[in-house]
Amino acid sequence: MFDVFFAILRRDLLLAMRRRTDVFTTLFFFVIVVSLFPLGIGPELNTLRLIAPGVFWVAALLASMLALEKLFLVDYQDGALEQMLLAPQPLSLLVLGKVAAHWLITGLPLVLLSPLLGLQYDLPGETIEVLLLTLLLGTPALSLIGSIGAALTLGLRGGGVLVSLLVLPLYIPVLIFGAGAVEAQASGLGGGGHLFMLGAMGLAALVVAPLATSAALRVSAE
Amino acid sequence: MSSRILNWFKFASPATFYPLAGTIGRAAAAVAVVLLAVGLYMSFFVAPTDYKQGEGYRIIFVHVPAAWMSMFIYVVMAFWAATGLVFRTRLSFMMARALAPTGALMTFIALWTGAFWGKPMWGAWWVWDARLTSELILFFLYVGYIALQGAIPDVRRGDRAGAILLLVGVVNIPIIYFSVKWWNTLHQGASVSITKGSSMAAVMLETMLIMTFAFWAYAIAVAMARVRLIILERERDTRWVSELPEVAG
């Protein structure tokens, strides 16, 4: 049964490799947003170190949200989505494959680049490690939760703005624990508790989101 | 047995519910007016001045009922959403849709009056207290639902998409509440506490309850009026609507 998961994963990754600009736009959006904050706030390193976790996480939230629109849209427009709805395999598994591919394309590069940007903010090594870990744990949850919003707004006019209205409030817990872990680590409290919460939320999203997304897809594509 | 089931679903049809909604709405409106008059009189003239907060505390007679209703209405909407998705009753979705603006209004009133209370009591219009923050997020959830309904021209899709969003939201509300709470307490000790426990004078509590029931009745009255309009709008091509005296006349 998991064949279909890997089939979708491979297909979406292959499609993304054929059109690399999509990958780079999301990544550079993240880089630009993170680099804008020092320009707006001032180059004072003490302030930057203080706000870094929040800035990184909000930028990751926005980047992940912006990338959502593409998640189902192309398949919807060329009719592939209809075939997926008709497929004998469970739709939630197909959705999971698409979300996994989406995270590998738009989430993972951003996670891997974040240590480099962390140096811009003069973060010490161990804080960067925790930041990397929180983004690694948290961004899959963002992609999962976001897929619900993407499915609900599929093909609507102005869907891009609408999806932010639907999805951003649901992102808040992830933001709180993601940025909280880095802050707790930096202040010497240890970010362990936050990381566990972040992992728990990721697992909860892994269970609930594919089901909700497939229900929403059936509604939107009918 | 079968007659029971028939009775149970009798008012699930818009045609039979439309007159019933009118009756309930008028009754609820009357109750709301009476309770509001009594409640407002009690909150201004009967309830004693608070020894610590002076006269300013009286705003809680509006604030607390609005906050309660804002949360309650969201749960009711989620209940209708679930009912609609399970039983495929059109009316359930209409109920959810009719409640949304009232819920958003209650959330807004709770936030607004909270700010007015906070300025003299805490010296700030806004603090990032766990309750305030989660109420604000609740407001965002209402806005998201209304925006989604507005963006989808197709009624059937809009109903169902909104229902899924409501169910996702209602699962998320406890998570959001606790994460905001822990976020707040992890940052700093709670500098302000809204809970005063049961130290409240009995008459204050009675006033608050009367006001809560007044708000409740108001919400029912407005939702019924709104659901009647939604029914008329959606069933405008049916025979029973064209035979209604208010439509035909």
Image (cartoon, coloured by chain):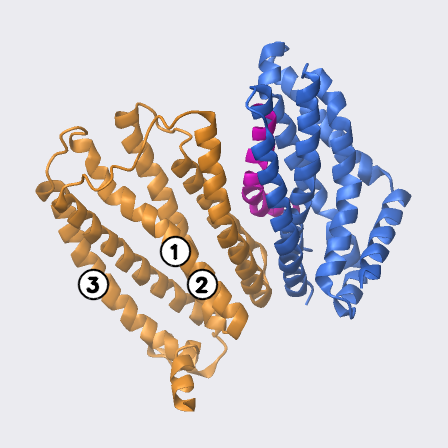
Chain colours: A blue, B orange
Residue B73's mark?
1
Q: Is residue A161 visible?
A: no
Packing grade of label 1 (10 A; few <14, some 14-19, many >=20) is many
Residue receiving disc 3: B30
Q: Magenta residues, as a range?
A: A160-183
In this rendering, which labeled residue sits more in front, label 2 or label 3?
Answer: 2
Looking at the image, tell me whether mark 2 or mark 3 is earlier in sequence order.
3
The image quadrant of residue A49 is top right
**Can you say whether A54 is above or below A168 in the image?**
above
Residue B113 % position (x, y) = 30, 38
- In this rendering, do the residues under marks 2 and 1 share a single chain? yes
Residue receiving disc 2: B79
Residue B212 % position (x, y) = 25, 52
In this rendering, position of residue B115 left or right of residue A208:
left
The numbered mark 2 sits on a residue in which chain? B
Residue A44 % position (x, y) = 61, 9
Asked if the stretch drawn in magenta spans residue B163, the answer is: no
Residue drawn 13% across the image and 46% down it: B202
At mark 3, the secondary structure is helix
**Which amino acid is tagged 1?**
Ile
**Which amino acid is tagged 3?**
Ala
Residue drawn 74% across the image and 50% down it: A99
At mark 2, the secondary structure is helix
Packing grade of label 2 (10 A; few <14, some 14-19, many >=20) is some
Packing grade of label 3 (10 A; few <14, some 14-19, many >=20) is some
Nearer the observer, B230 or B42? B42
The numbered mark 3 sits on a residue in which chain? B
In this rendering, position of residue B170 left or right of residue A52:
left
Instruction: Count the labels in the image.
Output: 3
Calculate the distance from the C-alpha at mark 2 to the C-alpha at mark 3.
26 Å
Looking at the image, tell me whether mark 1 or mark 3 is earlier in sequence order.
3
